[in-house]
Image (spheres, grey):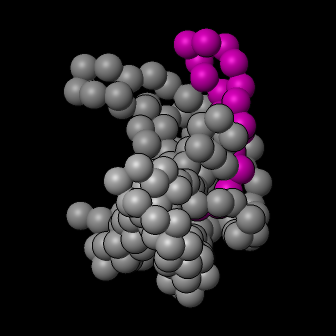
Amino acid sequence: MGEQLTESDVKKIQEEIEYRKLVVRKEALEAVKEARAQGDLSENFEYHAAKKDKNINESRIRYLERMLKNARIVSDQSRSDEVGLNNTVEVYFEDEDETETYKLVTSIRGNSMKGMISIESPLGKAIRGHKVGDRVLVKINENAGYYVEIKAISKENDDSQDEIRRF
């Protein structure tokens, strides 16, 4: 089972692949050529660094192409009163008596430090499709979980400004 991606995610990945193939690859090959021209390759740090950069770029291209090949396209559409993709949600955690705000995103854009949680995370799975006022059990595993209450939902269009997480 592959990553869950929206059409917007697919477009961003395709743009990155194209950029890496047309721009970064050309620059990396040129850097390898220049470093190779400096002479003895066994002690040429610039040559080894240029080769490493070239290989990292090629690995990233392969990774992104494999991700697209195995991806499952999900809709970012949801009913106006339900939690869905690209919505900002205010959630009350009963056990901690705290309220947090999160944006629900696909896993490749998830970044908890920026308040963006994946639809594949326990919290994301639990709240997706629920409405304001719903009390939801977030299951961590078969024996553990916690309750949250959805306080507010803010509908947003996918502004496509979120960066795809780099690995």
39 vs 122, nearest the viewer: 39
* Quadrant the N terminus occupies: bottom left
Q: Which residues are magenta?
A: 85-101
Q: Is residue 4 left or right of residue 124?
A: left
- Residue at 59 percent of width and 18 percent of height: 94
Asked which quadrant contains residue 30, the reply is bottom right
Residue 2: x, y in percent? 30, 65
Residue 111: x, y in percent? 59, 44
Asked which quadrant contains residue 121, the reply is top left
Q: Is residue 63 left or right of residue 116?
A: left
Residue 76: x, y in percent? 57, 70
Residue 27: x, y in percent? 59, 77
- Residue at 69 percent of width and 18 percent of height: 98
41 vs 111, nearest the viewer: 41
Magenta highlight on residue 90: yes
Visible in this render: residue 159? yes
31 vs 119, nearest the viewer: 31
> In this rendering, is residue 144 above or below 53?
above
Q: Residue furthest top?
A: 96
Visible in this render: residue 126? no
- Residue at 60 percent of width and 23 percent of height: 93
Magenta highlight on residue 139: no
Q: Is residue 108 left or right of residue 158?
A: left
